[in-house]
Amino acid sequence: MTDVPLTQPRSTNPFSGLMSGTVGPVTVVVLAIIAIWYIAAVALNTPFQKDIYERAGQSDVAVSQMVTDTLFQERPVLPAPHQVIVEIWETTVEKKITSKRSLVYHTGITLSSTLMGFLIGTTLGILLAIGIVHSRVLDKSLMPWIISSQTIPILAIAPMIIVVLNAVGISGLLPKAMISTYLSFFPVTVGMVKGLRSPEVMHMDLMHTYSATRLQAFWKLRLPYAVPYLFTSMKIGMAASLVGAIVGELPTGAVAGLGARLLAGSYYGQTVQIWSALLMAAFLAGSLVALIGVLEKLTLKRMGMAQ
Amino acid sequence: MNALASAKDTEMVETTTSASPNRVIDIENLSLTFETNDGPVHALSDIDLKIEEGDFVSFIGPSGCGKTTLLRVIADLEKPTAGHISVNGVSPEEARLNRAYGYVFQAAALYPWRTIAKNVALPLEIMGLSAAEQRDRIARNMELVNLTGFEKKYPWQLSGGMQQRASIARALAVEPDLLLMDEPFGALDEIVRDHLNEQLLQLWAKTNKTVVFVTHSIPEAVFLSTKIVVLCPRPGRIYDVIESDLPRDRSLDIRETPEFLKIAHRVREGLKAGHSYED
Amino acid sequence: MSTMTAPKRRLDMPALLAWFVVAMVVVGLFSPIFGPDYGIMDVPRLALCLVILAIAGVRYELGFMRNLVGDLILGLVTAIAAWLLIATVTNHAGEATLGFWALTAATWASAWLFVERLAVWKSASPTAQRIINLAIPAMFGITLLVLWQLIVTGAGVPKVLLPAPSEIWVRLTNSVPTLWADFQQTFLKAVLAGYIIGCGSAFIVAILVDRVPFLRRGLLPIGNLVSALPIIGVAPIMVMWFGFDWPSKAAVVIIMTFFPMLVNTVSGLAASDAMQRDLMRTYASNYWQTLLKLRLPMAMPFIFNALKINSTLALIGAIVAEFFGTPIVGMGFRISTEVGRMNVDMVWAEIAVAALAGSLFYGIVALLERAVTFWHPSVRGGRA
């Protein structure tokens, strides 16, 4: 064999490997977003900064000085990323968790109603899906409503549920969790119905040849098939649940929770506070969804369904 | 193995312009190596092949022998890594840009949102032909594949055989002198396949086009071709080229004649020999 | 309707329901209907209701007329019974006792029985079958409304907690001008403007991103992540930046609709398979020809998926953004202020309008989808 393989010309640039995956591009895009954020912060905060200089009688401020000042205003139109980070640091690490000004405290409040609502909603959704798959009447009468109810702005009911339940003496965690339940059970129901119906006809026929009962077919065939669907819809349900919890905190008169921080921030023009609550909410959503993702990986691996 | 001969040449694919006027495809020392994570794969090695105008050439061989890859090189869907190839006397890329060939894929690949007539019109729209010319060519080529009357139907309303015929009409509508077909009837059942083979031969006789046809069916290759190229894998190379002496005008009955069986036997021997080589 | 020929008497769901109807009728016969001491004989209309329900239940148990006519009579009986109950309870609001609830339960069970029967109807004609398939959820919805009405009025639930459907309807018809003004402000201005700008700009960005593989790999994971974030939280910021009027709400809608559209369009543009792209290459087709003739049509199911998701998100975004500050008009504003004043019926009227607007918006997008992607297996109901 004197075969000399003729390779196609390939770039030996070490960056090409990094940039062809997703890690490189994502990093670059994130850095670009942060850069744009800084530029926007300077641009949006400049008018107010000029006002300050005028009132102070300073007319010849160096551009570099002005740029620095725009990034350290107390109530900027758009706070710079580092201001938000500092605010988050001060309100999480440097405050006692029990303090009303601790972001951890507010996040915990939101998290607890999110999780409570999510758990009830998921359980409800699974049970409803099982009913729908096994009962033709439930399927024909309920399913169209479940689907069309997704087109209705359910969140609009949130303030009413809170206030009305408050009026009859139910307050605290439960009303908010109810909104989360409401929002998270729809995706779970729809996803589970789809999942429980996903076994192929051939597999169902096989169960039929074993004259398996409906219960056996459910445990041995339908449920395993539905698990991937369940996790996908649980991710959507978790995200919806958090939105529900945050919106549920708006009408309670801004007492506690991330939603309350948003509302209080907007009342008093505390932009840094709004942004830190917003970033915290984003972080919370990201970690919760990621957590379900990890659970999904582990479960599917155990079931031998992971690729 | 002497791929070295081609390796000595430059990596660039050169165009031979010295081909005779009625030589449609001229391939010399052509090789193609894919770089994969498991090391290089020699999809094609040291291929030499001449195809004359009016030929019906079949590429046959086991899977992985590079028959489809060779067809794709002719169509400029793959670039060779060494050697020379010319199509109509120019490089495959120029030939593609001149719309010198029509290509029929393994599946019909019709667009479900277009009617059959609009599917046939697709290449014509891209070429920028006038509406009148398009209408004319659609009617002519739909008739050629016996699909007149199905213009307004959507692909998913037709059977698999009819879909594949529509895709042949689409390739013919470009009005190329060269037709490249990649296992076009592979997914169809045998009865439909026989029928379409017969129709394809009639079409070839009527239009006198050059056809390059990829298949893994021995009877199909022998029945259709004037020249059968047997390829074998690892590395993909030509094992045998059989010039068929069957008459150009043939019917399905010819498959029971001794001449047919003789050629089929030689093809089968070639496939066997090529196959045992790897062990 | 093969139940006629089935000789074996299984205790299936319809049979159980019929027994339940009969049992409830018996309870209703011997229990007080309304407080303080109304019996069934004191309320002639309810007596009639009781009699027809009893006949319907017993008839089903005995197996008479288990056919189309029998089912239709059952539906009619249920409707009359429901109407009699509603008409009676209005004069005795909050006084209902065991007998009344038994009759309510009997009516509900008979409605359920009717739906059970309706679900096994098979019609050869596709139009008739479609009507049946629409009638079942419609029946379910009407049953829910009737129960709501009966329970709220019968038990005398305070209006601030849950108004009866009839009260909501009265409020709705009396406040058409206010509701219309709110609808204009929130839907016609904020939602539509935000939806069109958000989806449109995301579509253009998606086409640009698609041309640069680097950007596509970088933006897609971020777009997916952002879709899971509570974006609605930007509402207070948008209100600060763009003022109280509708542009700030439109801005929230733009941000909320942007990412689902971006992610879906980008994955839709990648949906064409290798063979189809090779085909275009053999035609020496240029970028724009491939985009227009192959990749955009291929992306349409994905794009419409985003448009449908966004039709819901847009309305939610605009309403919730109004909780953070508005001029004195708008659906979100009305909901939050009327809740504060405990005018719950007005809130429900506003929610009814929002639900109607949301469903119509979604329905129009879905109809458009059917027209554009008629060829897709999910629409034509066939194999791929």
Image (spheres, grey):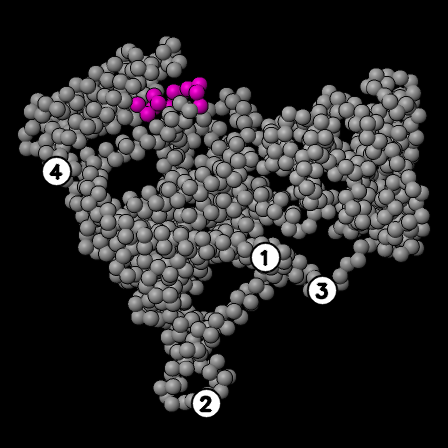
Q: What residue is shown with label 2?
A: A60
Q: Position of residue C115 (x, y in %)?
A: 32, 25
Amino acid bearing label 4: Gly
Say whether residue C163 is left or right of residue C372: left
Tell if the residue under mark 3 belongs to the same chain as the one under mark 1. Answer: no
Question: CA gap, disc 3 to disc 1?
Answer: 27 Å
Q: Quadrant of residue B101?
A: top right
Whether A249 is drawn above or below B49: the answer is below
* Residue placed under numbered mark 3 in the picture: A14
The residue that disc 4 covers is C94
* Residue ID for mark 1: C208
Q: Nearer the viewer, mark 3 or mark 1?
A: 1
Image mark 2: chain: A
Label 4 element class: loop
- Same subunit, tags 2 and 1: no
Residue at 61% over, 33% down: B115
Identify the residue shown where x is 41% and y is 19%: C123
Please state the horizontal and vertical placement of residue B131, each as a whole percent of the image. 66, 39
Q: Nearer the viewer, residue A94 or C365?
A: C365
The quadrant of the picture occupied by the C terminus of chain B is top right
In the structure shown, which secondary structural element does the residue marked by tag 2 occupy?
Answer: loop
Distance (Cα) linking label 2 and label 4 = 77 Å
* Residue type for callout 3: Pro
Q: SS for tag 1?
A: helix
CA distance separating discs 3 and 4: 79 Å
> From this viewpoint, is residue B78 visible?
no
